[in-house]
Image (cartoon, helix red, strand yellow):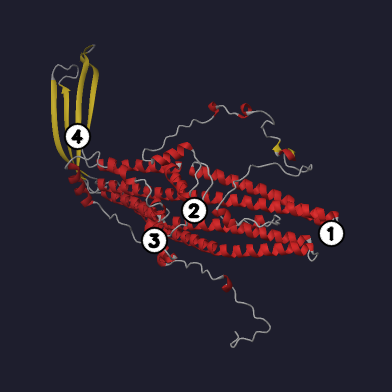
Amino acid sequence: MSLRSCLLAACAACIAAPPVLAQDRLADPQSAAAPMQGPLDSTPQTGSYGTDDPDSARDRGDARADGGGEDDAAVDDADRIAVRPDLPDETPADVAELAESGTPVTSLTDALRLAYWTSPSLLAQRSTVRSYDYRVAQARAGYGPKLNYSLATTWQRDSFERFRGGSTIAQGWTTTASAILTQPLFTFGRNASQERNSAAQLEFQRQVLRSTEQQALLDAIAAYIGVLRDRASVTIAKDNLAALERQLSDNKARLAVREVTATDVQQIATRVSLGQAQVYSAQRDAASSEATFLRMVGVPAGELVPPNPLQLPVRQLEEAYAFSETHSPVVLAAQAREKVSRASVAAAKADLMPRIDFQGSGNYGTQSAYNDNLRTKEWRGQFIISGPIFESGLRRARVSEAMAANDADWRLLDASLRESRASLAASWNDWQAQQAAIASYRDAEGSARKAYEGAILQQRAGLITTLDVLDLARELLVARSNSNTAIANAYIAKARVLAAAGALEQAWLMPNAARYDAGRHLGKVLHNGDMPVLTPVVRSLDRAAAIGGTGPRPVRDPAGTRTAAPIVILPADKLVAPALSPASPPPANPPK
């Protein structure tokens, strides 16, 4: 999240009592967002947009009743969507209990576990992966036999003309049955290519699942930190408003004894009104963060405790680049997508070759077409070699199409590597900059507080004006708010580094917590259609004739070895060269 100093700079600030530090609010939040209230100033206003009464905070289209009890506000359950909680069987019992009870969470660990096990989008992607498990089982079924049958009851009526004007009619019912057994023996890689295609599709969906898991965890972290940040912003805004009101009351008393002018009082009153608006805005942001937390985690946020620092599996950006090449779901998904189209090329090439099948059939029929008095039984077995001879270039065109599609996916692998590195570099630099800015914001906050406290004393002594004090108070407010935002942004940016590198996973964040096993379901359904001895033998023969490999392909991008350098974070006193004073001696070798 970007700094909100532009918003905060428009509001006045003045704090007499020592305010609570923004970082302290993140470490020990005590106050939640208060509900929205109407304006404190009841003076009639003009120019309101669609508001009948400014004090009521109601719009003309507001259908809420001014009075009435719970019965007036109640909503008929029949008008609501039906809710029947039902989590997958593999959900840990404590997580399921927490999700169904709706108890507010207080720790980041609980929030992450809830997001990992109950996120609807994540559960949907897991079901999608399970559906692709069956595609692999379907492909393996192609190695085995297929037995089909047909049963027929037929009525037939024929008329045979014996002489002109006379004919013989024969009619009746017959029943027949037939069965056909087909067993592929050698398809020159057709079935093996189909199995590779299904396996690559499953691999792609699993990488999509990893990406969805990381996004769910990242959203949960951002929502958790967002609630802490915005609750602290509410406290900062309320402290600012309280200080402004105290200063207004003090200056009204001084006006009565002619120590200040009415203009000074009006200046402070203006900042008080702006401070009230600031509180409303902060409460709005906090309420929105609470709603986002409920969306990402599934339960409300309680009294959140400060989260533990995130750990990285690398120390330098260059190490992160190397780590992401083998762990980033973006890169691995691109590799799987290339394998899918590569298997399509192998299947198209195999379609140019012949195939050998065994076919057995049995028929139970009748000698007569009009009755079942005399039966026939037929058994037949045959080895069939079939293949294309001439199709006007159709199959060759299919091969060329598949090769072009595969080349496109291969190029997209290069693009995914660039995208992954750019995202990782941006997240890394953002994290480093935000982390370095925290100390500067804290120093600015301390300096602004001292300047403001000294300005109050100087104002009472008549050395500076009220406007000078208000300007210094506004700088203090901006410094506090920026410090609060920087602390939150640094934590979220570090989580984005983990996600960009492919390490923001349950196994890394919570090594001892239960994890979803995507391969467990595949193990249950993979061999359901296998025939003992027959399937392994036929599969081995077909895989030996399959065209092309299954390993990852190299990157062809000329920029594949180039990586962006990380941001250089210098100490604050080294950011710029100090200016020489007039008394300083000239440099020995002045620049030309």
Give SS at disc 2.
loop
Residue 143, image x and y in percent?
Answer: 22, 42
For marks 2 and 4, give the CA distance: 64 Å
The residue under the point 31% across, 47% down is 199
- Residue situated furthest top in the rendering: 166
Question: How many numbered circles does the render carry?
Answer: 4
Counting residues from the start of the chain, the first of labels 3 and 1 encountered is 1
Q: Residues within 10 Å of mark 1 (few under 14, many from 20)?
A: few
Q: Nearer the viewer, mark 2 or mark 4?
A: 2
| Residue in front for this viewpoint, 511 or 20 | 20
Label number found at residue 323: 3
Give SS at disc 1.
loop
For marks 2 and 1, give the CA distance: 50 Å
Give SS at disc 4.
strand
State the residue position of label 1: 259
Label number found at residue 181: 4
